[in-house]
Amino acid sequence: MSDVSSQKYYVPVLRYLLEHGTVKKYDLRHIVKSSGTMDKLLPKLEAEGLISMKEEILGRRTYLVSLTDKGQAVAEQLKKAEQVAEGGEISEFLTDDMKILIYLLNEKETPYESLKGKFSSAYSSVSRLKQMKLVDAKIDNSKFPREEIISLTDKGKKVAEKLKEIEEILRGDEK
């Protein structure tokens, strides 16, 4: 990332894609005015695994740009950081992590793709939970394509049980 002129657009482009999903490359022109800068920026974001670009012929050649799972996770963290900087609640950083732990407490083992469908920030949440050793991931080779199965560790189960208790107290379901 040595080209400073394109670096300043990283955050606005990722945030725009988070809000709008897959867009035409042309739609990013209101953020990045220079086509030269755009032509440097997008390949860099793609090389870093943050976006994917797909060429389509829609009358003329068009590029569709979208976030990858990694890009989505980065954009969500940027959005949350902006919310905190603007006075948002710090607890917003943990919400999906907590929900995933409670979900896994009830479901035991769950395919990662299923979590991705239920939680928008599954990629970053599962990565954090793995780092904290609260979840394990194993590959199920019996299926094609291979499937990543996520489950709680013993430590994760204890944390999830406490979180569930807190959730019940907050909802008023105290025993």
Image (tube, rainbow, N blue to C red):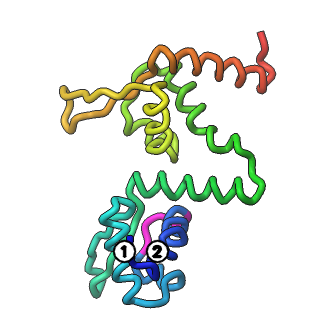
Closer-to-camera residue (174/36): 36
Task: Please state if 66 lies on the left or on the right of 85 as rendered.
Answer: left
Callout 1: 10 Å neighbours few (<14), some, many (20+)?
A: many
* The C terminus sits in image quarter: top right
Going by the picture, which residue comes out furthest to the right? 172
List the residue tagged with mark 1: 42
Q: Position of residue 97 (x, y in %)?
A: 56, 35
* The N terminus sits in image quarter: bottom left
153 shown above or below 48: above
Q: Position of residue 83 (x, y in %)?
A: 69, 56
Name the amino acid, label 1: Leu
Task: Please state if 120 lies on the left or on the right of 68 as rendered.
Answer: right
Which corner quadrant of the image does residue 22 belong to?
A: bottom left
Closer-to-camera residue (16/134): 134
Q: In terms of secondary structure, where does tag 1 sit? A: helix
Query: Is residue 145 magenta-colored?
Result: no
Among numbered discs 2 and 1, the one appearing first in the sequence: 2
List the residue tagged with mark 2: 7
Q: In terms of secondary structure, where does tag 2 sit? A: helix
78 shown above or below 173: below
* Whether label 2 touches label 1, CB < 8 Å: no
Residues shaded magenta: 19-23
Residue at image point 20% right, 30% down: 143
Task: Please state if 104 lies on the left or on the right of 55 as rendered.
Answer: right
Name the amino acid, label 2: Gln
Residue at image point 60% right, 58% down: 79
